[in-house]
Amino acid sequence: MHTEDDTWVCRSCENEESRDSQTEADMTTQDGQRDDGAPAVADATQGSTETMHEPCPADDCDSDRAYYEMLPKPGGSYEVRLFTCVECGHKWRES
């Protein structure tokens, strides 16, 4: 849902509900919460010797092969691909 002025609007079905500032204030407290960072998630590509076609962005390297890992971003809504060049060892990421 997202807000439009004093109304909550569902992105899927366009249902609308009036906003209640007291209820929203009660829901947004962060007292007693802690951030433990991203959860540890096993990934089948970690430690893999598989490579993929991905040109190395290093200026002095012409390699077009890289090892890769898939890692979740905090919140788990997206993944980040981490690359390591097969030839020069340069590391970079793509999200």
Image (cartoon, rainbow, N blue to C red):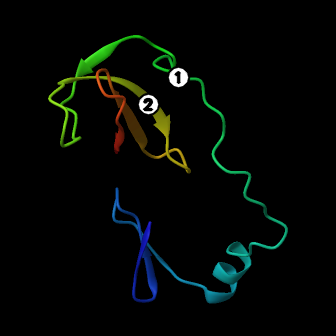
Give the residue at the far right of this rendering.
Answer: 32
Camera-nearest residue between 61 and 68: 61
Which residue sits at x=36%, y=42%? 93
Q: Is residue 17 above or below residue 85?
A: below
| Residue displayed at 40% across by 64% down | 10
Residue indicated by mark 1: 43
Q: Of the numbered discs in the image, which one, if any, rests on residue 3?
A: none
Task: Indicate the quadrant where residue 83 lies.
Answer: top left
Quote the CA–CA distance across marks 2 and 1: 7 Å
Residue 33 image position (x, y, % from top left): 79, 64
Locate the C terminus and report the quarter of the image it occupies.
top left
Measured from the top left, where is residue 8 in percent x and y? 45, 75
Above or below residue 53? Residue 82 is: below
- Which is more toward the observer, 79 or 61? 61
Residue denoted by label 2: 70
Q: Residue at x 38, y 35 (%)?
A: 81
Question: Of marks 2 and 1, which one's residue comes earlier in the chain?
Answer: 1
* Residue lying furthest top: 49
In terms of depth relative to the viewer, which is nearer, 78 or 51? 51
Asked whether the residues under the numbered discs 2 and 1 touch, taking CB atoms below 8 Å apart as contact, a structural biologist would say yes
| Amino acid bearing label 2 | Met
Q: Is residue 21 above or below residue 60?
A: below
**The N terminus lies in which quarter of the figure?**
bottom left
Question: Which residue sits furthest front?
Answer: 60
Q: Quadrant of residue 60?
A: top left
| Residue 26 on image: x %, y % | 73, 78
Residue 17, percent from left and from top: 48, 75
